[in-house]
Structure formats: structure tokens, C-alpha cells
């Protein structure tokens, strides 16, 4: 007869055929309690289908055992066999003492499928059966959070916290802070984050405090908490960007630039760090460094729109026409929609006296910028210079429609008449 040690060895050897052969033999003769433990072990190490096989065998032996049905359903969900999981859960009788647990698993399945109303209905039914079970209340709070009903979720967590309910693995103050933050109620989140810190100053809680402080314009607090975080975990990469953003908002640009460069030292592959470093360098007058940072961001992601737009804007403002056209040509060849660059490309070609290409890009830019007064004015002036009076007059009429109180556009029209 096959035994557990042989099965474990087959797993270690990565031999699925041998594993299933041994399983078939073991299930015919093994002890059911040991078989149940084997199913748990197989599931833990990722052999989900094999674990399901064991539970199916046990369910055949103990057809009235609802826990086996629920366990199998959970594994079927993990294996993306959702229809099978649904069919299994429907087998649990309403009279079974584990019916509420089956309802919770069913709610999890519906939530996974995006059927949030159906999930809430099953959870509410379970709560009616076990109204004093904190885990059910927490499950409902999480479902409400997933549904975007932040205040309702927060209310449940507040009630649990006020009753000093203990849920294993869950810091209720931290979770309540996260719920408020998810709903952009950062002022309300802060005191709960601070309370969570009293229990344990983990990097995630410190980051949560810092982010909430940043959102409420308490930049000194944000920087202080981020310094604590970095002291605990120097490789918490997102802390460096938030610290630099906080210092930037506090108008300490040199310190912000130092913080973002520290982040780059820690993580050389984060395009957002290079983008922000580029912007800060430009603000500090370190143009060459700024260009270098922005080019690095684009090297990491050749379709990084914000970095490309920032760099093209800089080249355009400095009338570095060759650089504008070189970079623009590179990104346009990717085939994506780069309409945001077209006005600058058009003006660059116009400065370069390549009026044919300027016309092409003014026309390309028009659909996206037809409500932009600055663009329409430049386009109208270009058309006037090109002697395209009829087209220029149409642009002027559009400017009049956008700004009927601006006398400049009517003066232009009169000059045409």
C-alpha cells in the first residue's frame, strides 16, 4: 500500500504520473483523518487538483459531512472551477449547522465574479443565522468596501472596534484607517492610523499615516513618518517618492531632490522616480540632469506618456527643435495616440519653416484641441501666414464662440472684412 512518505517523495521529484498513481492506491486503503491532513498539505504547496481529488474521495465516504463540501468548494474556486464550486455549495442543506459557513463561501464566490448584490444577500442571510459572529460582520465590511460603500464599511469596523472585538490577523484600527483612506476620508483615517501605530509601527502603517498626512497637507508629519519607515525598511521604495513629493509641496526643493535621488539609488528601475527627479531637477535649474532623468524614465518605458510629454515640452520651450522632432518621431512610430504632442510638433515644424509638415500636425491636433483657445489662436495665425484666409476665418469664428466677450477675435474678423 502507498503511504504519505511515498506521496511526499513523488511531489518532491515532480512526477505527476507517479503522484496520481500513489494517490489512487493510498485513497483506497488509507486512514480518512490522515487523508484529510494530506489534502490540506497538498493545497498548501499548490497541488490543488490533487487536494480536490482527496476531498472528493472523502466526500464519497462521508456524504453528509458539509465541511468536506465547503473545503472542496474553496479549492475549486482556487482552481478557477467556479461552476463546480457553485454546484458543490448548493449541496449544503439549510438545516446543516455549517450552512452559514457555506453561505460565506458562496458570498466569496459571487464577490469574485463581481456579483456584489448576490454576495451581500448571502452574507446577510448568514448574519441572520449567526448575528453575533464578528467574522461575518468583518466579511460584510470587506464586501461593502469592495462595493465602494466606504462609510457603511467604516461603520461596521467602528462597531467592532468599540466592542474591542479581537479578530486574528486583523488590526481593526489599521483596517478602519484603510477603509477611510480608500474613500478619500484622510482626516478621519489619520487618528486610526496613529492608534494602529501604538500597537505596532509596521512599514505599511507608517506609509498609510504618511500618505494620509500628505493628502491633508500635513507635509512635515508625512516626512517624519516616512523617515521612520525608511529607518525600519530602507527598501520600501514607494516611501522615497512620497517623501520627495511631500518636501516638494513644502517648497524644500533641494531636500526633495536629495530624497528622490536616494530612492533611485535603492531602486534603479522605477520610472516614476526618474520622472519626478527630472521635474525637480528642471525646477532647480539643473536642466542637463533633468533631461538625463527623463530620458532614463523613457528608456524604462518607451511609451511613458508623462515623461515623454515633459521632455518634449522642455525641448519645445527651449526651441531645441531637432530634439523635439527626434523624440516625437520615435514615439509616434509606436502607433499609439500621441495627440497631446501634436501642437508642439506643429509649432516646431513651423519654426523650422517646414510648413507642409506643420500643416499636417496642426490638422492632426485640431480634433483634440478644438476647444483650446491658445491652440486655435496659434493655428489661426499659422493659417493667416500661409494665406489660407477662409480656413483662418473659420478658426476665428470658433474663437468667437469660445470667448464671445473677447474683442480681439472680433478685431481679427473686421481686419479680414
Image (cartoon, grey):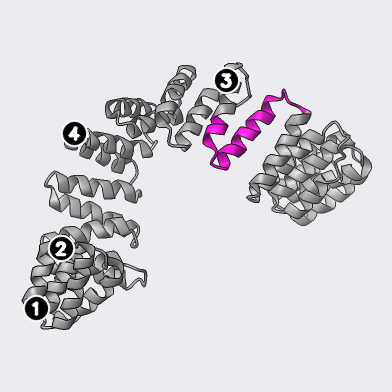
Provide the residue designation for mark 2.
316
Secondary structure beneath disc 2?
A: helix
Question: Callout 2: few (<14), some (14-19), or many (20+) C-alpha neighbours within 10 Å?
Answer: some
Residue at image coords 24%, 46%: 277
Instruction: Work out whether mark 4 precedes mark 2 in sequence or the reverse, and give the earlier one.
Output: 4
Q: CA distance from mark 4 to mark 2?
A: 27 Å
Report x, y in % for residue 120.
67, 40
Provide the residue designation for mark 3.
161
Per the rendering, the mark at residue 416 is: 1
Secondary structure beneath disc 4?
A: loop
Report x, y in % for residue 200.
48, 20
Q: Is residue 142 above or below residue 56?
A: above
Q: CA distance from mark 4 to mark 1?
A: 52 Å
Magenta highlight on residue 150: yes
Q: CA distance from mark 2 to mark 3?
A: 56 Å
Instruction: Work out whether mark 1 precedes mark 3 in sequence or the reverse, and give the earlier one.
Output: 3
Asked whether disc 1 touches disc 2, contact meaning CB atoms under 8 Å apart, the reply is no
Q: Nearer the viewer, residue 315 or 203?
A: 315
Amino acid at each position: 500500500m502507498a503511504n504519505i512518505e511515498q506521496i511526499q517523495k513523488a511531489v518532491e521529484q515532480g512526477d505527476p504520473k507517479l503522484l496520481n498513481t500513489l494517490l489512487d492506491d493510498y485513497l483506497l486503503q488509507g486512514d480518512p483523518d490522515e487523508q484529510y491532513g494530506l489534502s490540506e498539505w497538498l493545497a498548501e504547496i499548490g497541488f490543488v487538483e490533487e487536494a480536490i481529488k482527496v476531498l472528493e474521495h472523502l466526500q464519497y465516504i462521508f456524504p453528509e459531512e458539509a465541511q468536506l463540501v465547503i473545503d472542496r468548494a474553496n479549492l475549486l474556486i482556487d482552481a478557477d472551477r467556479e461552476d463546480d464550486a457553485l454546484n458543490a455549495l448548493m449541496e449544503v442543506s439549510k438545516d446543516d449547522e455549517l450552512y452559514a459557513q457555506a453561505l460565506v463561501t458562496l458570498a466569496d464566490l459571487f464577490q469574485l465574479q463581481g456579483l456584489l448584490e448576490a454576495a451581500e444577500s448571502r452574507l446577510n442571510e448568514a448574519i441572520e443565522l449567526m448575528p453575533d459572529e464578528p467574522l461575518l460582520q468583518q466579511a460584510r465590511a470587506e464586501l461593502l468596501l469592495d462595493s465602494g460603500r466606504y462609510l457603511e464599511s467604516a461603520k461596521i469596523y467602528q462597531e467592532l472596534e468599540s466592542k474591542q472585538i479581537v479578530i486574528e490577523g486583523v488590526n481593526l484600527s489599521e483596517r478602519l484607517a484603510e477603509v477611510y483612506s480608500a474613500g478619500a476620508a484622510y482626516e478621519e483615517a489619520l487618528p486610526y492610523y496613529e492608534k494602529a501605530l501604538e500597537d505596532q509601527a509596521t512599514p505599511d502603517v507608517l506609509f498609510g499615516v504618511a500618505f494620509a498626512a500628505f493628502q491633508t497637507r500635513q507635509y512635515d508629519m508625512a516626512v517624519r513618518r516616512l523617515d521612520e519607515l525608511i529607518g525600519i525598511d530602507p527598501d520600501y521604495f514607494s516611501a522615497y517618492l512620497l517623501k520627495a513629493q511631500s518636501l516638494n509641496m513644502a517648497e524644500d526643493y533641494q531636500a526633495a531632490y536629495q530624497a528622490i535621488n536616494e530612492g533611485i539609488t535603492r531602486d534603479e528601475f522605477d520610472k516614476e522616480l526618474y520622472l519626478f527627479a527630472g521635474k525637480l531637477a528642471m525646477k532647480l535649474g539643473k536642466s542637463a540632469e533633468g533631461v538625463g532623468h527623463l530620458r532614463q524614465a523613457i528608456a524604462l518605458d518607451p511609451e511613458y506618456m508623462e515623461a515623454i510629454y515633459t521632455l518634449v515640452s522642455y525641448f519645445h520651450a527651449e526651441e531645441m527643435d531637432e530634439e523635439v522632432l527626434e523624440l516625437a518621431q520615435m514615439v509616434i512610430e509606436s502607433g499609439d495616440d500621441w495627440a497631446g504632442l501634436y501642437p508642439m510638433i506643429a509649432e516646431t515644424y513651423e519654426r523650422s519653416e517646414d510648413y507642409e509638415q506643420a500643416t499636417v500636425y496642426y490638422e492632426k491636433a485640431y480634433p483634440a484641441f478644438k476647444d483650446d483657445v491658445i491652440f486655435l489662436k496659434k493655428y489661426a495665425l499659422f493659417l493667416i501666414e500661409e494665406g489660407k484666409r477662409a480656413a483662418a476665418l473659420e478658426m476665428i469664428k470658433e474663437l468667437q464662440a469660445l470667448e464671445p466677450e473677447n474683442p480681439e477675435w472680433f478685431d481679427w474678423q473686421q481686419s479680414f472684412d
